[in-house]
Image (tube, grey):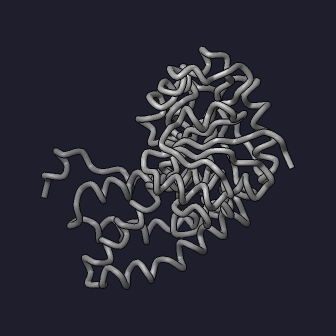
Amino acid sequence: MTTERIALIGAGAAGSAIILALHQAGYPIIGVASRRLDSAKQCAERVECPLATTDAAKVSVNADIIFIATPDDQITTACQAIADQGVIRPGQLFIHLSGARTSDALAAAQRKGAETLSLHPIQALADPVKGASLLKNTYFCLEGTAAAVTKAMPLINSLSGKTLVIPATKKAQYHAALCMASNYLITLESVAVSLLEQIGVDRMAGMQALLPLIQGSVENLAHSGLPNALTGPISRGDAETIAHHIDSLRDIPQEYQSLYRILGKETIQLALDKGGLSAEAAEQIKVLLTPLPPDECLIT
């Protein structure tokens, strides 16, 4: 069992999940603080922690590693409040879990001699117990001081995790990529369900019908990687089918048409990289996916 003592500030789903996983890995959790005392107590009971409170400084004073898992816009304020209490000491490691904010959000702790790190689990953590199990073998994105990254590696190793280490200047682009992969996937499926709804398919039935297709695509991606997981008409060079698609989408919202064309053009390059699309077919499909100029659209 490790002797490094962990405290948590912010007992939401993500923070509760990560300290439960670390508790299961053998780390002692010595304090949980949250704005709501009942949340702190519930989290503390789960990790056999003796201290649950609303006082962030109280749980930080004796901890070696402090996780600040508040909402993003409260990280800096929470850290500053702890620093103002005079309980931060050199050698401590302050970590926040935000995917969007850099370790600069913890500057108040760094000024007091602590190491600071943003550690973002690349995982959807909606429930503490399920989330703790999902954290095992997952990827974590690290950004912070070199010493902080080194200190955090045993935490990640205890979860059999893997790491991506990025500079602070690239954190926003990193988070944009994750939003596209996760959040916008849901948006894309919502658009697909809406298209089915417009032809008379019940919305719930449409979603249920698409789920096996989505799951199969994800499994293909996991098994074959990029670009080999790509399937569909562009991958086959089927320009005729793409032409029928575009013709059928004339009466849907312009935003949906634009989305189809943009994604289609990106798919052309992916299909070329895969090797199943000829240059001639790629050019045909590219022309089909390029909207006519407004003046030409008016010609009848």
Question: Residue at image x 48%, y 55%?
Answer: 39
Give the left or right position of residue 270, taking residue 200 as reference.
right
Compare residues 250 and 92 and report the one nearer the observer: 92
Give the image location of residue 7, x and y in percent.
64, 41
| Residue lying at 43% horizontally and 45% vertically, measured from the top left | 35
Location of residue 277 in the rendering, given as x and y in whole percent from the top left corner: 60, 59
Q: Is residue 243 above or below residue 100?
A: below
Most extreme residue toward the right is: 1
From the top left corner, tell me how far across and down residue 252 is, in percent: 23, 65
Q: Find residue 172 and report its horizontal and vertical position in percent.
A: 50, 33
Quadrant in the rendering for residue 285: bottom left
Instruction: Identify which residue, 121 or 65, lies in the foreground.
Output: 65
- In the drawing, does residue 86 fall left or right of residue 298? right
Splitting the image into 4 quarters, where does residue 67 fall?
Answer: top right
Give me the residue at 47% from left, 26% from top.
Answer: 81
For the residue pair 7 and 14, the one nearer the viewer reads as: 7
Q: Quadrant of the C terminus?
A: bottom left
Q: Is residue 16 left or right of residue 54?
A: right
Q: Is residue 160 visible?
A: no
Residue at 31 percent of width and 72 percent of height? 195
The correct choice, above or below, for 46 with respect to 262 in the image is: below
The answer to whether residue 40 is seen in the rendering is: yes
